[in-house]
């Protein structure tokens, strides 16, 4: 059972553009929604996270938008840079139960 | 920030042998640690949840006798792949949850296991 659906599977953006990755979850009990960035051969690194009592959170160029009623959340990367090229995973968590999306491979072209 | 280390970063072993992977939280205590497996270009698959001082909780379909997990202290969990076979070749990643009031999971750098 896929509890977190992530799209798109891959994304190509020009340098300076906005990258948008979307996720939808099923379990309304989830109470923590992180995004992870993973480079090839490395472990995922926590990028930004949000709790369901907040509709938006911004940290630098990264913004999470959260829509509780629609059970959707998204990651926006402003002014995308080639160094942002990586795989991004959304996740939804309830205590010890964290479910990951399938991942989005982002390529930022110079 | 919270740092999780893994050792070794890569290992090659022969079929039938056992391999131990260590996961350490370097600057925080982790009552709970998690072990994931990741195949190329795929998402992370939770294998088991490791609790300090108690038995690990395995996900459905994960053989507990093959993937032995020990969480002997608040900073160390180990995963032992017993009688390894080529199909066990994968990228194994651990994570640790900081118990100091926040819910973030911090991931280790991963261990690449190749079984020949």
Image: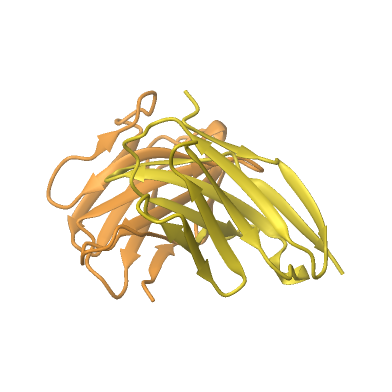
Describe residue A47's horizontal placement relative to residue A53 as left or right: right
Q: Quadrant of residue B76?
A: bottom left
Q: Position of residue B69 (x, y in %)?
A: 28, 44
Q: Residue at x 70, y 40 (%)?
A: A9
Count of numbered badges drawn on the protein:
0
Which chain comes out orange in the rendered image? Answer: B
The vertical placement of A87 against B49, above or below, is: below
Query: Is residue B12 among what the camera can see?
Result: no
Residue drawn at 66 percent across, 43 percent down: B41
Left or right: B31 with respect to A109? left
Relative image position of residue A39 (x, y in whole percent)? 63, 60
B1 relative to B56, above or below: below
Q: Is residue B71 visible?
A: yes
Q: Nearer the viewer, residue B38 or B113?
A: B38
Q: Colour of chain A?
A: yellow
Q: Nearer the viewer, residue A62 or B111?
A: A62
Residue at (35, 32) in percent of width and height: B66
**Quarter of image, res B26:** bottom left
Question: Which colour style is shown?
Answer: by chain
State the residue lying farthest toward the left: B53
Q: Nearer the viewer, residue B7 or A29?
A: A29
For the C terminus of chain A, the image quarter is bottom right
Compared to residue B28, the image places residue B71 above or below, namely above
Provide residue B116's location: percent of width, then percent of height: 59, 40
Residue A32 as seen in the image, left or right of residue A58:
left
x, y percentage for residue A40? 66, 57
Eyeballing the image, is A53 above or below B86?
below
Residue at 28% x, 55% y: name it. Answer: B77
């Amino acid at each position: 059972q896929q509890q977190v659906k992530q799209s798109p599977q891959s994304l190509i953006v020009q340098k300076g553009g906005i990258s948008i990755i979307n996720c939808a979850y099923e379990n309304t009990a989830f109470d923590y929604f992180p995004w992870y960035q993973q480079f090839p051969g490395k472990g995922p690194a926590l990028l930004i996270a949000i709790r369901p009592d907040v509709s938006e959170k911004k940290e630098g160029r990264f913004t999470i938008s959260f829509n509780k009623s629609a059970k959707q959340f998204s990651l926006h990367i402003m002014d995308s840079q080639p160094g942002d090229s990586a795989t991004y995973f959304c996740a939804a968590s309830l205590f010890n139960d964290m479910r990951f999306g399938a991942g989005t491979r982002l390529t930022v072209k110079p | 920030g919270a740092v999780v280390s893994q050792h070794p970063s890569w290992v090659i072993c022969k079929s039938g042998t056992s391999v131990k992977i260590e996961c350490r939280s370097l600057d925080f205590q982790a009552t709970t640690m998690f072990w994931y497996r990741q195949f190329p270009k795929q998402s992370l698959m939770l294998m088991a949840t490791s609790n300090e001082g108690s038995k690990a909780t395995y996900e459905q379909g994960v053989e507990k006798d093959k993937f032995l997990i020990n969480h002997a202290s608040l900073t160390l969990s180990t995963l032992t792949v017993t009688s390894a076979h080529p199909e066990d070749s994968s990228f194994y990643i651990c994570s640790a949850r900081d118990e100091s009031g926040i819910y973030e999971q911090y991931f280790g750098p991963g261990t690449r296991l190749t079984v020949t």
